[in-house]
Image (cartoon, helix red, strand yellow):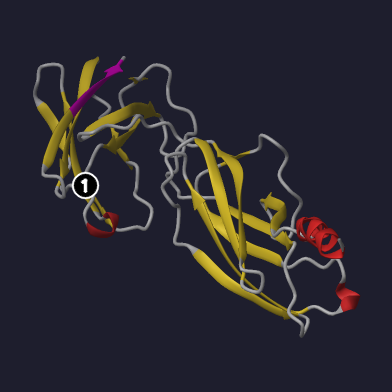
């Protein structure tokens, strides 16, 4: 009878053992800062400060713990933003430290051209003493510049400005003789080489209402780079100053784009008015 009672009691004892858990996750804009409020939107290029605690770990007879962990952030499509961050926690926890929970701290860099959407930080922990593991997915939102994806090379979001640093595009692309004309557009749909290498170049020209080419960029503007996180698009821009005696009418900007990695070309045209 006593053996039966002991066997019946054993599962209850085992179930009462604390489970390894990742708790108290915090995403903040400041190192050691308070957690961002629910629904907060981060922006491309921002650095996030992440921390969390570990509970339910097992101590050895010598009052020691040994944990391993990894942290990695992912975009809405599940693509990692940076390389996996891994580390160990080896410490001695005395009875006076009851309730103490090891802390994980790291930084997460949002890529400069990140898209909008729901991102996540995935944390994984393994307790080498107890041979148990746990993981936690911590979501965060990013509000980025919208560039619709494309399977082939394309120019999107052609917009005009009066000055290079103007935050808002013109509602109507209309200028006067002598004005500065700034145009910005996004190039996407290019292919990637090894290490997410891209090789994109473009040449812009200004065409008169008669069809005559008034100006062509002397040298192509080029974007040649490698990165861990694949660059979604190339942010392109150029500016010219209109001659004081230029005639009114509808003028065209032509952009010839080349993707050397994918062996693709594309031509885009957009118009503006001189009044």
Task: Name the one closer to the observer, 231 or 105.
Answer: 105
Please report the residue visible at 80 percent of the width from the left and 78 percent of the height from the top.
93
The magenta segment: 268-274
Instruction: Locate residue 15, reporting x and y percent.
Output: 76, 55
Q: Is residue 53 left or right of residue 190?
A: right
| In the image, residue 209 above or below residue 76 | above
Q: Position of residue 174 (x, y in %)?
A: 35, 18
Magenta stretch contains residue 211: no
Question: Residue drawn 66% across and 34% down?
Answer: 39
Farthest residue toward the right?
A: 96
Nearer to me, 245 or 45: 45
- Judging depth in this view, the residue of 268 and 178 nearest the camera is 268
Residue 274, horizontal then vertical, whole percent: 29, 18
Q: From the viewer's perspective, is 62 left or right of 123?
A: right
User: Which residue was labeled with disc 1?
Assistant: 200
The answer to whether 127 is drawn above or below residue 206 in the figure is below
Q: Residue at x 76, y 85 (%)?
A: 62
């Amino acid at each position: 009878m006593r053996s039966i009672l002991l066997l019946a009691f054993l599962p209850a004892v085992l179930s009462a053992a604390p489970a390894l858990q990742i708790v108290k996750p915090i995403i903040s804009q400041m190192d050691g800062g308070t957690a961002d409020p629910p629904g907060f939107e981060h922006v491309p290029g921002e650095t996030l400060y992440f921390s969390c605690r570990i509970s339910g770990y097992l101590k050895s007879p010598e009052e020691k713990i040994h944990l391993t962990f990894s942290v990695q952030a992912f975009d809405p499509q599940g693509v990692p933003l940076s390389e996996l961050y891994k580390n160990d926690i080896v410490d001695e926890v005395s009875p006076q430290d009851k309730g103490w929970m090891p802390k994980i701290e790291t930084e997460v860099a949002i890529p400069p051209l990140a898209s909008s959407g729901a991102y996540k930080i995935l944390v994984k922990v393994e307790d080498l003493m107890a041979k148990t593991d746990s993981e936690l997915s911590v979501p965060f939102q990013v509000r980025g510049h919208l560039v619709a994806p494309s399977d082939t090379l394309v120019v999107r979001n052609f917009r005009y400005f009066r000055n290079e640093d103007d935050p808002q595009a013109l509602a109507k692309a209309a200028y006067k003789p002598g004005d500065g004309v700034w145009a910005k557009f996004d190039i996407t749909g290019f292919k990637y080489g090894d290490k997410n290498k891209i090789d994109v170049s473009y040449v812009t020209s200004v065409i008169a209402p008669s069809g005559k080419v008034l100006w062509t960029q002397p040298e192509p503007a080029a974007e040649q780079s490698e990165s861990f996180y694949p660059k979604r698009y190339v942010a392109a821009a150029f500016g010219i100053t209109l001659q004081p005696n230029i005639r009114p009418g509808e003028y065209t900007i032509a952009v010839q784009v080349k993707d050397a990695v994918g062996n693709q070309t594309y031509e885009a045209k957009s118009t503006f008015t001189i009044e």
